[in-house]
Image (cartoon, coloured by chain):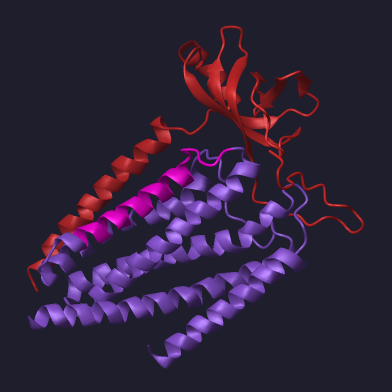
Amino acid sequence: MKSKLPAILVGGAVVGVLGFLTFGSLGDNLVYYWTPAKLQAAAASATGATVRLGGLVKPGSVVTAGTVTTFIVTDPTGAAVPVRTESIPPAMFREGIGVVVEGTLGPDGTFVSQRLMVKHDENYTAPAAGQAPTGSFEPGQE
Amino acid sequence: MRRWEIWVGLLGLGMLVFGSYYGLMVAPREVYMGDVQRIMYVHVPTAWNTLLCFTASFVGAVGWLLTRSWKWDYLIESTIITGLVTGSLLAVQGAIWAKPTWGVWWTWDPRLTSVAVMVLSFLGILALRSFVDDPVKRATWSATATVLAWVNIPFVYLCVRWMASLHQTQSTPKTVDPAMVFPLRLNAFAVLFVVIFFVATGWRIAREQRKRELAE
């Protein structure tokens, strides 16, 4: 029993190192999405690569023409990236909401996306008194 | 089957039926997501209890490594199996919620990725257990692996705050309409009681198996 303690300490150290290697570097190198400011700052190397861009849909910027939807993604720094996509926006898509788009930044600074995902925040709101729920999803609707 | 287990299981089941009825029929319809948001009333309780289950496995693992008392090994085995069931349910519920809201069934964001790592690592530990015939080696090896696998659990919980992710951060009673908090809380305890039922049953099965193995 007495000889177990060093083994546990070594095991704990291994766990700590593994944890640091796994999660410490995740934050720096592996990001799920880039914010508009970071994407533009890295535009030289990011152009042409498949990346994800995340931010808020700028109110008033959504334009739908046929199968093409264009809008502007912004972040709190004020950076803005125009996005162009032919994917069908999820029903939750609207102005002001958070989105994550997968695609490539073109040489003209427009982000061309093949996949548009809508981010929901941690707020769950009941309809105000007398207000009909505007809940966007109905069964059978994509 | 012990009497208290049956009562705890039935209590959990009854609460789950009532809480889910309340969540589906009585709680208000969420303004932006509509009815699909009601899956929260099972998804969030499932998530909490899955993390709790694997944390109990961690407690069992540390307990075994320090004391070599068999009760900790029963706890490791029963909580890993139960956690894998709830963890699999968690992923399915999440996908069902994700498709109509996010627009995709799955994406490799930090939360979903770390949950996948969690479920697969504990599935690996369960596989490891089935490959080792010597009960003492099995307990020690799986306890060590459980300590390693558990390191991921705080990350599963906190990654949505630390990193850019598609999954939303934790809600608090302030960000959830009061009428939605009640069924959520009720179902959290309902799932907890059902989980306790399964862990207690798994514990007794593990104890019988260990007794038989050690008697041989």
Above or below for A61 versus A28:
above
Above or below for B166 versus B94:
above
Residue B109 drawn in magenta: yes
Main SS class of the magenta portion in the image = helix
Viewer-nearest residue: B139 or A7:
B139
- The colour assigned to chain B within the rendered structure: purple
Q: Which residues are magenta?
A: B104-129
**Residue B39 picture location, percent across and down:** 63, 57
Q: Can you see residue B130?
A: yes
**Residue B193 picture location, percent across and down:** 49, 77
Viewer-nearest residue: B33 or B60:
B33
Q: Residue at x 47, y 46 (%)?
A: B111
**Residue B157 picture location, percent across and down:** 47, 54
Query: In which quadrant is the N terminus of chain A drawn?
Result: bottom left
**Residue A120 picture location, percent across and down:** 65, 44
Viewer-nearest residue: B10 or B182:
B10
Viewer-nearest residue: B122 or A16:
B122
Q: In screen coordinates, is B88 left or right of B26? A: left
Q: In screen coordinates, is B100 left or right of A53? A: right
Residue B4 figure quarter: bottom left
Query: In which quadrant is the C terminus of chain A drawn?
Result: top right
Q: Residue at x 57, y 11 (%)?
A: A106
- Give the residue furthest to the top: A107
Q: In screen coordinates, is B157 left or right of A77? A: left
Q: How many marks?
A: 0
Q: Residue at x 18, y 77 (%)?
A: B67
- The colour assigned to chain A within the rendered structure: red
